[in-house]
Image (cartoon, helix red, strand yellow):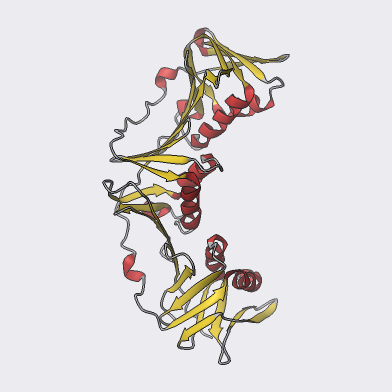
Amino acid sequence: MKISILKNELNESIGHVSKAISSRTTIPILTGIKLEVTHQGVTLTASDTDISIQSFIPAENDSHTIVKVEQPGSVVLPAKFFVEIIKKLPSKEIHMEVKEGFQTYISSGSTEIQIVGLDPEEFPVLPNIEENDMISIPGDLLKNMIKQTAFSISTQETTPILTGILWNLSDNEFKFTATDRHRLATRAAHLEGTENVHFGNVVIAGKTLNELSKIIPDQNMLVDIVVADNQVLFKIDKVLFYSRILDGIYPDTSRIIPTAYKTELTLDTKKLSESIDRAYLLSREEKTNIVRMQTLDQGGIEISSSSSELGKVREELETIDFKGEPLKISFNSKYMLDVLKVIESEQLVIAFTGMMSPIILRPLDDSRSMYVILPYRTTN
């Protein structure tokens, strides 16, 4: 293998695929990035068996030469060193040559590097996915849906299925659900052209989707998604991102969501967030994160928290609308702030059926998002 390649293009592709490198793997070949060179261009691949990412660099783009191929071939290079050294090379163009025993020589400007490569034949083959049922979703919408649900996944590996986000697609409605048993986030979107595609109980690790989100460009680009038996493939421009589907059945979360409410409050999202953030400072010192909210006789609500060492904080907040019975409730302020950070609506509705029933939060102008937080039982 012998090529000359533009540094910025190589660097960008390495940045994409390196997200699939695991520092915990015990398989030596998976600590590397596979480079495969043909006269069409260079393909980079990395995998940790749960996710695999492949990025293609074309030899030419808009009649602009990116890769000059003198000799096709392939090699696996140690990712940790390869990622760092390519960033730090001095020239815009990099020359690479693989010789006998996969000894790889890299030069750029006056810098010359020799790396001991590995046999590409030992690298795992990517999953073979039939692309019969493919859906397309705007990249910014997909990133939003991940952001607005991923914070509710469980971090406990004892229940692996809850470390993922549940996907369901039916009747053009694409829905994400995440829960750690203490809170729940759901986000749905209407997808045109998906009438003939249906799937349920597709659960993808939240960490994986967060990594995917970093690859999706900011400009509005369509992401193609193919769901197979145990794999999902994402196609983003010249990047292929494969993810394993988590094993197991996701719990039925619909049973915890009330259908009627005794109390409904409409509040200013920013003012509520700032108020709870101040109360959180004291509750954090107690290591409980408990903040109390109660409705006031004259209208409005009171937000309060206390610390045995620092003191108390209490403030009143106006409600935009108030329906139903008076209420006093305690909750985890960190969980509440996580929700308020992802709500884009200026106003939100908080609904309750009682002091020990789930707290429901909905953006006022977005019926496709809903959040649930379980309250705390407190003595005062």
Residue 159 in view of the camera: no
**Is residue 363 depicted above or below 298 in this figure?**
above
Query: Residue 218: percent from the left, percent from the top?
Result: 56, 43
- Number of labels in the image equals 0
**Is residue 299 depicted above or below 268 in this figure?**
below
Query: Residue 255: percent from the left, percent from the top?
Result: 31, 69
Residue 81 shown left or right of residue 353 in the figure = right
Residue depicted at 49% across the width and 85% down the height: 327
The front one of 71 and 190 is: 190
The front one of 361 and 140 is: 140
Residue depicted at 66% across the width and 72% down the height: 278
Residue 276 in view of the camera: yes
Residue depicted at 47% across the width and 50% down the height: 141
Query: Residue 277: percent from the left, percent from the top?
Result: 63, 69
**Is residue 150 depicted above or below 254 in this figure?**
above
Residue 311 shown left or right of residue 354 in the figure = right
The front one of 235 and 290 is: 235
**Is residue 149 depicted above or below 227 in this figure?**
below
Which quadrant would the C terminus be assigned to in this image? Answer: bottom right
Query: Residue 21: percent from the left, percent from the top?
Result: 50, 34
